[in-house]
Image (cartoon, rainbow, N blue to C red):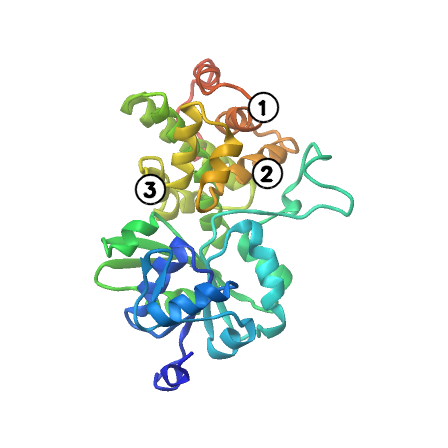
Amino acid sequence: MDMNWKKSSENKPVGVIGIGSFGTAISNLLAEKNNVLVYARDEAVVKAINETHMVKNRKLAESVRATTDPEMICDSCDVMFPMVPSAAFREVMIRFAPFLHPYHFLIHGTKGLSLSLPEGKDLGNIKKIRRKNISTMSEVILEETVVERIGCLAGPNLAKELLENQPGATVIASRYNEVIREGQRLLRSDNFQVYGNSDIVGVELSGVLKNIIAIASGALSGLGLGDNAKGLLISRGMVELVYLGKAMGGSTQSFLGLAGVGDLVTTCNSTLSRNYTLGYRLAKGEKLTDIVADMEEVAEGVNTVKLINLFLESTDLRAPIAENLHKVLFEDLKVEDALQNLMKIPIYTDIDFFN
């Protein structure tokens, strides 16, 4: 790697941990105003980035460099953006923990949940979980590292559109104003707006829970249904999202913002969404295992559906969309039958979560 690149900068480079499609998009956004150092485990990927500025046919800015060394990126960068799937997030934080310090800022962009169970327990032998068993990614960072200045990046951020430099926006949520301000300084541009929110758990849960509704929305499209059905699903899905999110520690206001409504509407209507695409293919008759094996990147909603249904078993809440989607994904219920189940539920009040 060209070390003159780092030394020539007046400021330290910004780190990005993970170089999937969203990590690539964020790297390019950051590179508009900063040198960027990317971490990837695969030496071939790092070599390609440093020599050709390409990763999986996606173009990276000239000011992006890469390394396989966690210690190097932690020493070089005060601010880092972890962009790895939720299934690998804890493992990555454990790997980075020896090199992280309290002065570091970590702003993650992962829309998933992590499960912690007592020794000897796993998803195959439990019937319910409580909130203490579920961690958002900011909670994983707190659990596994000494970093406290943590942020979350969420919103209607389809990677392909960001890579095409189309107009967009995101929310950076943190309990620390300095994290929000730094994220805004690093990312904001003429084409990309960055809002702030102090409710980090609410913003994280917005990004996580909307994936459930996105899978259902894709399934409706796969059945060939129209916009009335889509509008019904999105609006009732929003209600479900708010109830679940509040039960898990988020505020109603966060779910009604860009990370909630904004991301929900986008993801429920876009073939660029992995979760929407998964639902569409399910409705067309494909098996979940075949779809997951065929997808280039993770559809986080599948794991989220599983964890949320286990969480529901320990509460008095009902979430009809999540419950029926669980039956479709894991109990062989047909999408058409799940739709009929939902249409028959006797719910007569439109909105009551403001009461």
The reply to whether residue 212 is visible in this rendering is yes
Q: Residues within 10 Å of mark 1 (few under 14, many from 20)?
A: few
Q: State the quadrant of the C terminus.
A: top left
The x and y percentages for residue 288 are 51, 31
Q: Secondary structure at mark 3?
A: loop
Left or right for 183, reference 94: left
Taking the spot 43% from the left edge, 39% from the top edge, the residue there is 210
Front residue of this view, candidates 211 and 56: 56
Q: From the viewer's perspective, is the residue at label 2 or at label 1 nearer?
A: 1
Q: Answer with mark 1 or mark 3, whichever residue precedes in sequence.
A: 3
Label 1: which residue? 331
| 302 relative to 38, above or below | above
Label 3: which residue? 272
The x and y percentages for residue 108 are 47, 59
Left or right for 126, reference 256: right
Q: Mark 3 belongs to which amino acid?
A: Leu
Q: Mark 1 belongs to which amino acid?
A: Glu
Q: From the viewer's perspective, is the residue at label 2 or at label 3 nearer?
A: 3
Q: Residues within 10 Å of mark 2 (few under 14, many from 20)?
A: many
Cα gap from disc 2 to disc 3, whole angstroms:
24 Å
Q: Residues within 10 Å of mark 3 (few under 14, many from 20)?
A: some
Front residue of this view, candidates 13 and 277: 277
Label 2: which residue? 307
Taking the spot 23% from the left edge, 53% from the top edge, the residue there is 166
Taking the spot 46% from the left edge, 64% from the top edge, the residue there is 44
Cα gap from disc 2 to disc 1, whole angstroms:
15 Å
| 77 relative to 39, above or below | below
